[in-house]
Image (tube, rainbow, N blue to C red):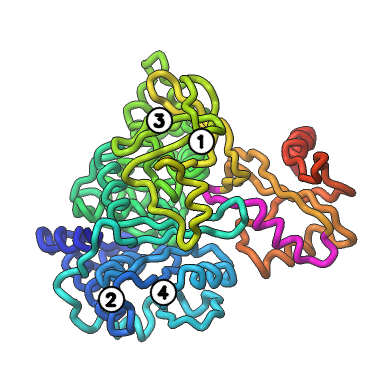
């Protein structure tokens, strides 16, 4: 089941339906979307891309992102979405690890591996779209990989999550069954990165023949979002909690009501109870929560529109503080360190099993066997489940920091800092922040350099969003008897310090 087949079916049924928008301007109907994707797929084939080959997408949000992605699938190849906010050196590592044969990226992307590169809107791009494509997408089996999503691990190096056609079918079906209905009159708005969850949600919207809109800014600007919602109507969007908070604040200040916003699916970080309560007061019944991770994409639990809005229910506030109940196609349970299930109310690791769970990590059997045991995905997240099946997150056993809805893994930042010759030791943790979810905080033992010098050092090595916003220079880091840095003690110390 090739996902590109969904595009062909929709285009065959409703060829004149609007498909791709940049702001308010419709750039393509579904027939043109299909034909461009098919042509792009043919162009890839002529450049030596065979079924199963990996093609990387290192692009900011734009309508061409969807053309390239479905074109990759049309050719039977595997899409490798790369976060556009990453440093060029980080993207190079991902494309090398994935064995990508080609990368779709602007000429200014800062890549240095020498891979064949096609720039969106460039001459090679135009040449690819000028030729007719094959009438049918390449045949793809359910167990064939079609999406290789890189998510960082506790080692600090990204790991490639292998998502098969079957995984995408299950996740798409679960969206339509458990998250939201989609109709041809609806519009999917991409204000969050298309390389992540926001882009993943293109699939159910293609299946139902909805339109797809990328803001002209290419990102998230509350005023622009509200203007587009009013102009286009029936808008769906994925938003990190920090985005919901900013939308609420802007609406309060400007008097906007969010007219035209039909559904806002939020997830990707901690949502404070006060924030979602206020958002509901301002915008009404438009919010739906999801909890997932790259290894089980967007499909572990969900809290429905009615459950978010049902203030008259005696358990409403408690349930609003949860991340909902299991999706239709998965089982979720709470387990101790030995993998034994715990009773309702007890905190343990969240385990999930089902059709959306990844096939494994790309060329990393050790990590796969450690993460999937007896068919159960060990999420690394800690939580408790009540008797009705509502899951509440309590902590993350992996030290991931979620800032602005994006995962940052401390060791990656620490290793980059330790390449400075005068940095002796470092430990990176997160500080809760009402706007961004968490801010990155670095505790550094160093001989000389200050925050400005170290920030400049990081600027040449990692993406901006991974760089600390708060620095503490100390003479030593707390350690246990085995020499391991005690991050719990650093967190306690941080609580006693006022934010800068």
CA distance separating discs 4 and 2:
11 Å
The residue segment tinted magenta is: 404-423
Q: Alpha-carbon distance for marks 3 and 2?
A: 40 Å
Residue 249 in the figure: left or right of residue 3: right
- Disc assigned to residue 416: none
From the image, tell me which residue sits under label 3.
324
In the rendered image, which residue does mark 1 sit on?
Answer: 271
Depicted 462 relative to depicted 308: above or below: below
Q: Residues within 10 Å of mark 4 (few under 14, many from 20)?
A: many
Circle 4: element type = strand
Q: Residues within 10 Å of mark 1 (few under 14, many from 20)?
A: many
Where, quadrant-wise, is the N terminus in this rendering?
Answer: bottom left
* Tag 3–tag 2 contact (CB < 8 Å): no
Going from N to C along the chain, the mark reached first, 1 or 2, is 2
Element under disc 2: helix
Of the numbered discs 3 and 1, the one sitting upstream in the chain is 1
The residue labelled by disc 4 is: 104
């Amino acid at each position: 089941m090739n996902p590109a087949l969904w595009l062909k079916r929709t285009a065959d049924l409703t060829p004149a339906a609007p498909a791709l928008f940049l702001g308010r301007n419709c750039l393509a109907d579904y027939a043109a979307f299909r034909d461009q994707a098919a042509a792009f797929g043919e162009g890839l084939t002529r450049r030596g891309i065979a079924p199963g080959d990996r093609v990387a997408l290192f692009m900011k949000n734009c309508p061409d992102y969807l053309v390239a992605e479905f074109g990759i699938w049309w050719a039977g190849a595997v899409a490798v979405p790369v976060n556009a906010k990453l440093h060029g050196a980080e993207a190079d590592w991902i494309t090398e690890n994935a064995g990508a044969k080609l990368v779709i990226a602007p000429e200014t992307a800062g890549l240095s591996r020498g891979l064949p590169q096609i720039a969106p809107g460039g001459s090679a791009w135009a040449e690819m779209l000028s030729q007719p494509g094959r009438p049918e997408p390449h045949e793809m089996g359910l167990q064939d990989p079609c999406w290789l999503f890189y998510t960082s691990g506790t080692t600090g190096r990204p790991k490639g999550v292998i998502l098969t056609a079957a995984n995408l079918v299950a996740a798409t079906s679960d969206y339509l069954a458990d998250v939201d209905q989609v109709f041809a009159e609806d519009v999917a708005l991409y204000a969050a990165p298309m390389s992540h969850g926001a882009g993943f949600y293109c699939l159910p919207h293609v299946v139902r023949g909805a339109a797809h809109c990328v803001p002209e800014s290419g990102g998230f600007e509350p005023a622009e979002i509200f203007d587009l919602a009013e102009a286009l109507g029936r808008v769906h969007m994925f938003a990190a909690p920090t985005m919901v908070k900013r939308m609420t604040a802007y609406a309060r200040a400007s008097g906007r009501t969010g007219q035209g916003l039909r559904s806002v699916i939020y997830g990707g970080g901690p949502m404070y109870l006060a924030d979602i309560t206020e958002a509901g007061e301002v915008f009404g019944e438009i919010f739906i929560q999801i909890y997932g991770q790259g290894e089980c994409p967007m499909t572990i639990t969900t809290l429905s529109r009615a459950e978010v809005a049902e203030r008259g229910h005696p358990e409403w506030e408690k349930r609003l503080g949860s991340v909902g109940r299991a999706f239709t196609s998965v089982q979720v349970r709470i387990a101790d360190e030995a993998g034994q299930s715990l009773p309702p109310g007890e905190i343990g690791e969240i385990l999930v099993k089902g059709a959306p769970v990844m096939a494994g990590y790309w060329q990393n059997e050790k990590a796969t066997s450690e993460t999937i045991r007896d068919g159960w995905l060990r999420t690394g997240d800690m939580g408790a489940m009540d008797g009705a099946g509502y899951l509440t997150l309590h902590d993350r056993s992996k030290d991931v920091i979620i800032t602005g809805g994006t995962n940052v893994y401390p060791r990656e930042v620490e290793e980059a800092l330790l390449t400075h010759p005068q940095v002796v030791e470092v430990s990176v943790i997160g500080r809760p922040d009402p706007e961004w979810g968490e801010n990155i905080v670095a505790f550094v033992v160093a001989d000389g350099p200050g925050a400005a010098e170290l920030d400049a050092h990081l600027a040449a090595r990692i993406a901006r969003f991974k760089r600390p916003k708060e620095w503490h220079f100390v003479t030593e880091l707390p350690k246990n008897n085995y020499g391991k840095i005690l991050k719990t003690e650093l967190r306690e110390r941080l609580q006693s310090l006022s934010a800068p």
